Image (cartoon, rainbow, N blue to C red):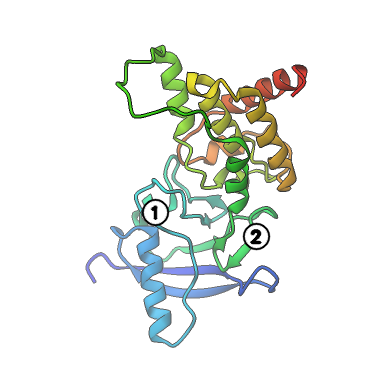
Amino acid sequence: MENEMKIKLKVWRQENEKAQGKFEEYDVNTNPDMSFLEMFDVLNEQLITEGKDPVAFDHDCREGICGMCSMVIDGRPHGPKGGITTCQLHMRSFNNGDTISVEPWRANSFPVIKDLSVNRSSFDRIIAAGGFVSVNTGNAVDANSILIPKETADKAFEAATCIGCGACVSACKNASAMLFVGAKVTQLALLPQGQAEREARVVAMVNQMDAEGFGACSNTGACAAECPKEIPLSVIATLNREYMKAKMNGK
């Protein structure tokens, strides 16, 4: 293979949520132009050929859009590069002969399904609790029919880029979901369509976040540092303000 790279992987293997997991080591021949997930495809083909159980891992679009790819690579969610997801990480980010450790997200609210695949339905329940607009918005209208200042629109779009991958939770020592919830609350609080349920929304989402067992904000900023979409810490400040206002108004 041209530009062949030999990599040693230390991969977390765990049969299910209740099973005892452990690291297993594999040697993989890969290529600098392969994505990290393509390298795992090669590993799984190798394991299947050997009659062994392939490594379970989450993936879907492989374009940095869906947020499914979730691996802690050498201790960092999504790996050593900033502002990208695991599927956008390429093997040229590593060196020939490297040993790379790969683990699942570590959080009680993200129980392991198998190996590197975790259950993130807790995020879905937080969204279901309030991350929506229930008013009848009708058919699609012209973009300029509801005038929104560009600065406001930009901030709302910035928050809306959150893909719900859970890297923020994995990076936080308290497994807090404040960055995720802050992004969803900020997006809708800034737009006119989100005003009708603004106060009820933030209370419902925070209550569900707590019910799911996510921890309190650690104030270290690790969540924003590891977020592949670079959601700013300011959304957490917005979340706190929105929640305080809602509670003061009796929500």
**Disc 1/disc 2 C-alpha distance (Å):** 21 Å
Secondary structure at badge 1 equals: helix
Residue 223 in which image quadrant: top right
* Image vertical order of residue 91 relative to residue 1, above or below: above
* Image vertical order of residue 200 relative to residue 3, above or below: above
Residue 168 in which image quadrant: top right
* Image vertical order of residue 172 relative to residue 156, above or below: below
- Residue pointed to by mark 1: 87
Residue at 47%, 29% (x, y): give it. 136
- Classify mark 2: residues with Cα within 10 Å, few (<14), some (14-19) or many (20+): some
Sequence order check: which comes first, mark 1 or mark 2? 1
Q: Amino acid at mark 1?
A: Cys
* Image vertical order of residue 135 relative to residue 17, above or below: above
Q: Position of residue 178 (x, y in %)?
A: 64, 36
Residue at 39%, 45% (x, y): give it. 65
Residue 111 numbered mark, or none: 2
Residue at 45%, 63% (x, y): give it. 98
